[in-house]
Structure formats: C-alpha cells, structure tokens
C-alpha cells in the first residue's frame, strides 16, 4: 500500500515565512509541560480546600491528563524541544510514558493517514453512528468501563484463565512492573497526602479523572479529528479535521492546540504552539477553504452521530 499523499511547506510558505513556524523553542515546550502540571496541582488544591469543587477538578485534571498525552505526542514528532535528548526526556518521563513505542505506532498513522494500513483507521471507520450508540459510548467512558477494558481487563482475564497450580506471584509481579509508573505515583502521592488526612486524594483527584473524564474527552477528540473522513482519501488537506474550540472547550476538551489537527497532518513537525500561526497564514492565503474544518465540537458530534436509529418493523 502506498503512503498517504503529503504536502510540502514550500507549496504554501516562503522560506522566510516557514522558518519561524518550524523552529522548536528551548523554553516553550518545557513551559507548557510545567503549565499542565501546575494546572493539575491547582485544581487538586482547590478540591482539597473546597470539596464541593471536586466534580470541576475532575474535569480540569482529566483534560490536563489529556494535555500531557498531547505533549508526549509532540515529543514523538521531536517538536517539544530542539535537543532530542531533552525532547525525549520530557516526552517520556513527565507524561504517561511509553514514548518510544508510541512514536513508532504514531508515525505509522501519519505515513498511511486514512489509508488501509493506517493503524488508527479503526477509530474513524465506524462513523457515522446513531445518537444512541454515541450516548452508550460516553456512558461507558464516564462510568469507568472503557478505562477498565483498556487498562485492567487483560490482567483480570489472565488471572482467571491461569492453570491450576500456576503461581499467582509472577503474574502480579509482571503487572506491577508493566505499570510501575502508575503504582509509584499512587504510593508517593498517598505517602505525601495521608499525614494531612487526604489519603483519598490520589483516588479522587488522579485515578477518577483518568478513569472517567480522560477516556471521554479522548474519544471526542478522536471523533473530531478523523470521523467521517473517507477511507483512502487522496487529498492531504482532508486527511484530518481542524475544529474550532472556544475557551471552555480548550480548558476541558482540547488543550494545547490539539484542535488544529488538519494543520498538524499537513506539517507534522511543527510545534503545537505554532499551529494557530500556521492556520492564520493559510487562511490569509485562501487555503483553509480547501481544508477539512468544523465550526465546533458539537457540530462534528452531530454529524458523527447522524446515522438513523433502527426502526422496529411490525410483524
């Protein structure tokens, strides 16, 4: 299968216009990483001081957990820092981790975007779906079912099917090792907060957002980016969708310019903080009318859930 068609910056920018957009800053990436963690810390502090704000904190923290994944995504493209060693350290150690494996997988997505060999094609293939189906998916996300299926169901199944007499310890040891960061964070956070009476903080202000809000906003982001994009789409300006995001959506759904996804697919090594500038230039040049865009996330969701409901036929 041939790779997806690509565009060249020189088709849309002069060398003088392109150079500052492609440049990786030595401080902006780390500053955005610090912002993500500071927002998480501030939301957690707010919830600890005013427990009534816990639902809001869960949404804010879940969105910043997505933000950390987005920054790991930028690191996978070498766009988080001009020094690749620093880039990879930030992208692996201060995010969900697994950068090397993710980079291999994700660059395959870019190489074959919306083509048969695209590893992410399965995410966009089912659309459009019905509103009922979309509601079911969101309910599964917000009730932790999606998280359990993705993160823990395999381990539970492994425990259930182990042979009679097979020792339990090696299975549990491998599970802990493969989730070392998860358990280390849990133990460290509980050790720091329990003496002050907040032993529950990690469960409510990290695990709960990770198991509920994060899966939902990840799903909605994936829908906005590639749902209803034709398989084997030949036009590289329509391999992905850019979605306008208002301030609330940027805070709770689409942090760190992830909504500029068409621009990202066109120029995948541009740092995320420069994507709005890329968009502005393409708009001035009259290119955005040819690109796949949407006025808002609700608009995309309406289209993606526009499949008619099945109507029962009377006997």
Image (tube, grey):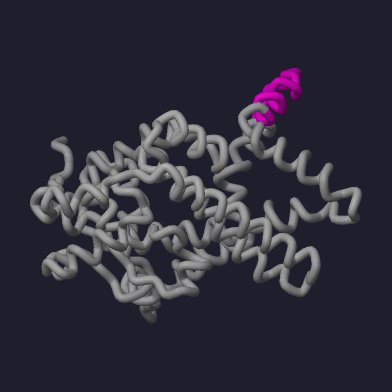
Quarter of the figure with the N terminus? top left
Residue at 72% across, 28% down? 172
Closer to us: 137 or 163: 137
The residue range painted magenta reads 161-176
The picture places residue 103, in percent across and down from the top left corner, at: 39, 35
Residue at 13% across, 48% down? 15
The picture places residue 251, in percent across and down from the top left corner, at: 51, 67
Examine the structure image and report whether residue 142 is included in the region drawn in magenta. no
Quarter of the figure with the C terminus? bottom left
Horizontal side of residue 100 vs 184, given as left or right: left
The picture places residue 14, in percent across and down from the top left corner, at: 11, 52
Horizontal side of residue 225 vs 202, given as left or right: left
The picture places residue 275, in percent across and down from the top left corner, at: 31, 57
Residue 182 is drawn in which quadrant? Answer: top right
Residue 181 is drawn in which quadrant? Answer: top right
Closer to us: 27 or 291: 27
Residue at 37% across, 56% down? 273
Residue at 59% across, 51% down? 147
Position above or below: 171 against 197 = above
Q: Is residue 308 visible?
A: no
Examine the structure image and report whether residue 173 is included in the region drawn in magenta. yes
């Amino acid at each position: 299968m041939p790779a997806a068609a690509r565009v060249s910056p020189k088709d849309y920018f002069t060398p003088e216009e392109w150079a500052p957009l492609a440049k990786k800053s030595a401080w902006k990436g780390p500053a955005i990483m610090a912002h993500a963690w500071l927002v998480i810390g501030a939301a957690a502090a707010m919830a600890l001081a005013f427990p009534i704000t816990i639902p809001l904190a869960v949404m804010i923290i879940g969105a910043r957990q997505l933000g950390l994944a987005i920054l790991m995504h930028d690191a996978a493209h070498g766009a988080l820092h001009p020094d690749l060693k620093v880039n990879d350290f930030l992208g692996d150690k201060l995010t969900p981790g697994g950068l090397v494996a993710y980079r291999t997988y994700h660059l395959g997505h870019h190489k074959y975007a919306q083509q048969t060999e695209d590893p992410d094609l399965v995410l966009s293939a089912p659309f459009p779906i019905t509103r009922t189906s979309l509601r079911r998916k969101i309910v599964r996300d917000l009730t932790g079912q999606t998280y359990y299926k993705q993160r823990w169901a395999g381990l539970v199944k492994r425990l259930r099917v182990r042979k009679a007499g097979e020792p339990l310890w090696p299975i549990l040891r491998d599970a802990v090792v493969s989730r070392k960061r998860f358990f280390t964070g849990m133990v460290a956070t509980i050790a720091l907060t329990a003496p002050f009476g907040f032993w529950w903080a990690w469960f409510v202000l990290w695990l709960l957002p990770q198991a509920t809000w994060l899966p939902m906003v990840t799903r909605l982001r994936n829908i906005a980016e590639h749902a209803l994009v034709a398989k084997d789409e030949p036009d590289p300006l329509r391999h992905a969708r850019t979605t306008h995001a208002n301030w609330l959506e940027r805070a709770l759904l689409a942090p760190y310019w992830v909504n500029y996804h068409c621009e990202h697919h066109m120029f995948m090594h541009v740092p995320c903080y420069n994507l709005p500038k890329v968009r502005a230039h393409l708009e001035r040049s009259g290119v955005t009318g040819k690109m796949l865009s949407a006025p808002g996330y609700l608009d995309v969701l309406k289209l993606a859930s526009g499949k008619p409901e099945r109507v029962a036929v009377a006997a």
